[in-house]
Amino acid sequence: MEPVTRIINWNVASWMTVLLYGGTSIAVGLSVLRLASRVRVWRAGLPEHVRPRWSDAMAKLVRWTSGRGKMAHDRFAAVMHGLILWGFFILFVGTTLVFLEEQTPLHFFYGVFYIVASCVIDVGGAAFLLGLTMAVYRRGVVRKPRLQSSAMANGLLALLIAIGVSGFVLEASRIAVDLPPFERASIVGYPLALLLRALGLSRATLQTLHQSLWTGHAVLSMALFALATSFLFRHVVVSALAVALAPRRSSGSLRPYPLLAATTVGTGRAVDLRWRDLLEADACTTCGRCTSVCPATAAEKALDPRGIVLGLQGLIDASAAASNTVSVPTALEKLTPQALWDCTTCGACNAACPVDIQVFDKIIDLRRQMVDLGAISPAARVALEGVDTRQNPWSHPPAQRNSWRESLTLPVLDVTHGSHTRKPEWIYWVGCAGALEPTAQSISRATAALFKAAGLDFAVLASEGCTGDPARRLGDEALFQSCRRRNQELLHATGVRKIVTHCPHCFNTFKNEYPDSDQAGETNGSGLEFEVVHHTQLIKQLLDQKKLTMRSKHTGSATKVTFHDPCYLGRHNGEYDAPRTVLDSVPGLVRVEMPRHREHSLCCGGGGGQMWLESAGAKRVEGLRLLEASTTGANVVATGCPFCKVMLETAGATAGKQHEIHVRDISEVVLDALDVP
Ligand code: SF4
Ligand code: SF4
């Protein structure tokens, strides 16, 4: 009976195997050397304050390779990448098995194993080619605007397709010589072999064809090994590392600034990037998802998040080729400064990146360097000086801070002058916008009215100061740390352990940035261990507990409402449901969604210090968002952030739509519908 196996390297001359093993060794060596030069540049970067945990890294990698990562919502892309990745993996394992069978004393490539392996390897090859065909369709036929057509991307696709096709025809030419029946297990190779036989090719021709294809396939595979860590090819290797090592922190929590503790502060060194940023820049697939969701890009400003990441990649290229340092040329010389100031820190880029690149964190680090160098715009300087000297970025006199509550009777806690006698359960933190901006003061009044109506045991503070959110996002880390210290002392002095705020920026800062006692290398352990909630969360609780009740019939002005997700409540802190549940509990109110909502929401344009900057674009971000809101037919766009309210209201006035669509905070909508005696 015919043995169920095949002779490895059948019809292969000895010079061909020398070519294969010699060439592959050189190709792999070249790739390893090239990767080592990149790793040297990454290692020259500044340290990260959090070390990755291997168990986390493995879990993230498993999730990513199983298609449950960020690409899962783009089914086509997820299937395409899955087919290519797993197809390639199966082919790689198959080739390794053949190598082990030939070059080691192990002998397993026969009988049932041979049949099953032949079938699985062909399935892997077919999946690989199907995935590549989908990629060609996407790039060549659908032509997604975000996908840059480059010779490198097209060359990578062509090389992979050539390897897949030549592998199948090579297999078919071998099978076609004798057509052993057990080779039917090769579900692609066998039908192709029948086709070659049907073409009338002689045994000698098939053998010649086999030799030529074997050599060609080997050369193409060597080219792939040689290029594996170069150009766009590199992302295949490095993106797995970026995903595995991605941080676990909330995207709303900015990293501490390593230069704060270093002697290099303010000395003008422009390029002090962290090793993670360097590695992540090398992982970029150039897919453009970050750019396609960026509100600044949509408003035609200078910012292109992909361009920022690729700019950093260019620095690594220069450094790897030059001196293994990252300071030639400097990052700031290469990048457009205005692009760095256009970012709203909405986090959409980070959320969209399929390989977990933390895009806007790099922008903030570069802003910090610019602040160190004094290279900031007059508007940013005024806002920072306001935070520093008047404890608010608008530079209002501190005495105006209490004007929003002058007509109200509210419990006030004054720890500075020691005049408080009773400790409430909750501190209602009003924030700079809610205290000082006329558009936002109505939010503070409505929220306080709701808390009073619910009988909540709360007090406002007599002497709030800025949390430091704008200072940190504008790159002034030292100023943020001083705000943090001042507020920590103030809050600790109250003895209260629960904070509610209507401002998602204050909420995010208290929740994610104050408790980190390692920030900027501080080791005093004075982190803020408070329960921090957003007012929409507390209002929901009060409704659930029937401490707030609505009128049975709706009488407010809002009839059809759409909710705009504030970035620092939704994307950065994952709270999408509480505000919607509150709106849904208002009788007679119809809630509709904008096309971009929840995780995919579009920023209002006010975060990241944009409220105080004048960054020019052909369009306004807030205008784009208001347009989306008005296309739903809603007469009210509700939000849960004073910045969003200010920005969207301004957009409404600019577009002359202020009478068609009103901008209201959720607290105001609820107060309108409240059943008060
Ligand atoms: S955080 Fe938002 S504005 Fe900034 S680069 Fe990312 S998507 Fe663009
Ligand atoms: S940073 Fe991420 S989302 Fe942006 S182009 Fe690179 S891989 Fe794509």
Image (cartoon, rainbow, N blue to C red):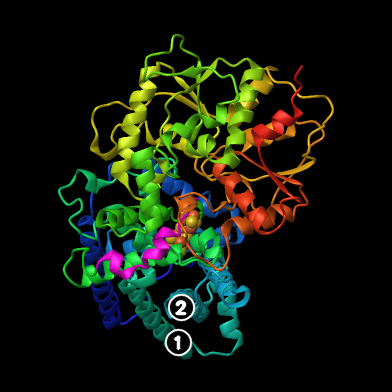
Q: At which x and y percent is residue 522?
A: 24, 34
> Is disc 1 surrounded by few (<14), some (14 to 19) or many (20+) residues within 10 Å?
some
Q: At which x and y percent is residue 153?
A: 45, 75
562 sits to left or right of 46:
right
Q: Residue furthest top?
A: 421
Instruction: Please state which amino acid type lies under the numbered disc 2.
Output: Ser
Q: Is residue 117 visible?
A: no
In the depicted structure, whether residue 466 falls above or below residue 301: above
The span shown in magenta is 330-346
From the image, which quarter does the C terminus lie in?
Answer: top right
Tell me the residue that label 2 is attached to: 150
Q: Nearer the viewer, residue 91 or 565?
A: 565
Judging from the image, what secondary structure is the residue with disc 2 in? loop
Tell me the residue that label 1 is attached to: 209
The answer to whether residue 338 is magenta is: yes
In the depicted structure, whether residue 350 falls above or below residue 190: above
